[in-house]
Amino acid sequence: MEIGEKPTMSLENSETAAPTQKPRPGGKRDGAGRPKGSTTVEASMRRVPVQVRLPKWMADWLQHQPVPAGRNIELALEHWGLNLTKGKGE
């Protein structure tokens, strides 16, 4: 090979060629997964990610609780009299 010449690859030698991968299981299959459009939670009760600024001590406390932070917030709101069972925000 000379300077400036592009190297050529030959696939004739099967020992140097990369082996082909076998197809893996998974992917879209008939009948797999939840049916489209089905929901188990009414729209007003769906959870959405929200970024909230909290004091460091409160964020640390929430992270060290055995109950998820969202559930702790729900429990506190119920304790203070907010009824969470009815559709809210509508």
Image (cartoon, helix red, strand yellow):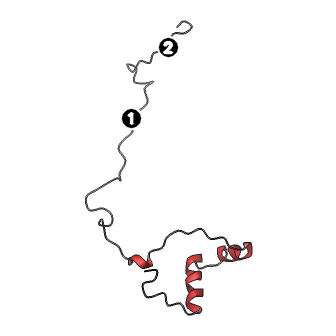
Gap between marks 2 and 1 measured at Cα: 25 Å
Q: Are marks 2 and 1 in contact (CB under 8 Å)?
A: no
Please state the horizontal and vertical placement of residue 32, each as a whole percent of the image: 30, 62
Name the residue located 48 percent from the left edge and 73 percent from the top edge. Answer: 47
Please state the horizontal and vertical placement of residue 37, each as a whole percent of the image: 31, 68
Name the residue located 59 percent from the left edge and 68 percent from the top edge. Answer: 51
Q: Quadrant of residue 4?
A: top right
In the rendered view, does 59 fall on the left or right side of 19? Answer: right
Q: Is residue 77 placed above or below 12 in the rendered structure?
A: below
Q: Secondary structure at mark 1?
A: loop
Of 58 and 24, nearer the camera is 58
Of 21 and 36, nearer the camera is 36
Q: Is residue 69 placed above or below 77 in the rendered structure?
A: above
> How many neighbours does mark 2 have within 10 angstroms: few (below 14), some (14-19), or many (20 or more)?
few
Q: Which residue is mark 2?
A: 6
In the rendered view, does 15 fall on the left or right side of 72? Answer: left
> How many neighbours does mark 1 have within 10 angstroms: few (below 14), some (14-19), or many (20 or more)?
few
User: Reading the chain from its start, which is encountered first: label 2 or label 1?
Assistant: 2
Q: Amino acid at mark 1?
A: Thr
In the rendered view, does 65 fall on the left or right side of 86? Answer: right
Q: Secondary structure at mark 2?
A: loop
Please state the horizontal and vertical placement of residue 42, each as a whole percent of the image: 38, 78
Of 60 and 31, nearer the camera is 60
Name the residue located 49 percent from the left edge and 15 percent from the top edge. Answer: 7
In what quadrant of the picture does the C terminus appear?
bottom left
Please state the horizontal and vertical placement of residue 31, each as a whole percent of the image: 26, 62
The residue positioned farthest toward the left in the image shown: 30
Of 29 and 14, nearer the camera is 29
Q: Amino acid at mark 2?
A: Lys
Q: Which residue is mark 1?
A: 20
